[in-house]
Amino acid sequence: MNEDKLYEFQIPDNVLDSKRVFGFRPRNWIEGIICAGIVGFIIAAIPFVLRVKLIFMVCLCGPILLLNLVGIKDQSVFEAIMIFRQALANKGEYHLRSANHEERYKSGRMAQSVNGIGNGDSAADKVAEFVKAKYEEFKERRA
């Protein structure tokens, strides 16, 4: 009973269709090679002994390439930097509307309420009226 059994395994079609090179996206490879190349050319231009240049290249270009390959949260480094810059540019202040700024609320830009009706039926409008009433009551007590 010494039978040689052939084991057959089905390879899914999408295994070879992956658009990754050694597990990393091509964009990350390109950015990594460009960044490491720039640093490598700068180091090559420095007038040191060849051995020192090679040590610097290995110590600097290798980590730069690896950092670009891994990326930040499954994005390339430059994608992450651009998203971060865009987030900083679009950052706004979010706060509750003050009772003193009712005329600004009534302007055309902010005329609609949270649910889009703008006639005072939304929860935000009710909260704003409640806060305004409490603020007026507080001002009367202080006076």
Image (cartoon, rainbow, N blue to C red):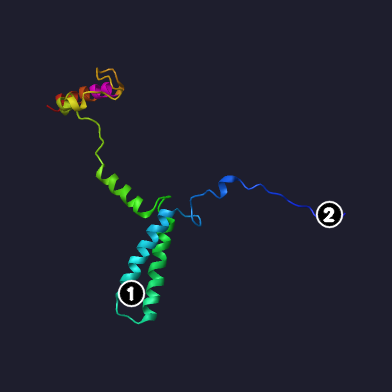
**What's the residue at 39%, 60% (across, down)?**
32
> What residue lies at 83% left-to-right and 54% top-to-bottom?
3
Q: Percent x, y for residue 78?
A: 34, 53
Residue visible at 35% across and 70% down?
Answer: 40
Percent across and percent down for residue 108 are: 18, 25
Residue that mark 2 sits on: 3
Q: Is residue 29 above or below residue 97?
A: below
Can you name the residue that lies furthest to the right here?
1
Report the residue that reaches farthest toward the left: 143
Mark 1 surroundings: few (<14), some (14-19) or many (≥20) residues within 10 A: some
Q: Confirm whether the magenta stretch covers residue 68.
A: no
Name the amino acid type tagged 1.
Ala
Indicate the amino acid at tag 2: Glu
Vertical order, 84 against 50 (above or below) = above
Provide the residue span drawn in magenta. Answer: 124-130
Q: Position of residue 137 (x, y in %)?
A: 19, 23
What residue lies at 20% left-to-right and 30% top-to-bottom? Answer: 98
Q: Position of residue 27 (x, y in %)?
A: 40, 54
Q: Nearer the viewer, residue 88 or 22?
A: 22
Is the Cβ of the residue at disc 1 closer than 8 Å to that at disc 2? no
Q: Secondary structure at mark 1?
A: helix
Residue that mark 1 sits on:
44
State which tag comes first along the sequence, 1 or 2.
2
Residue 126 colored in magenta in the image = yes
Judged left or right of residue 130, residue 68 is right
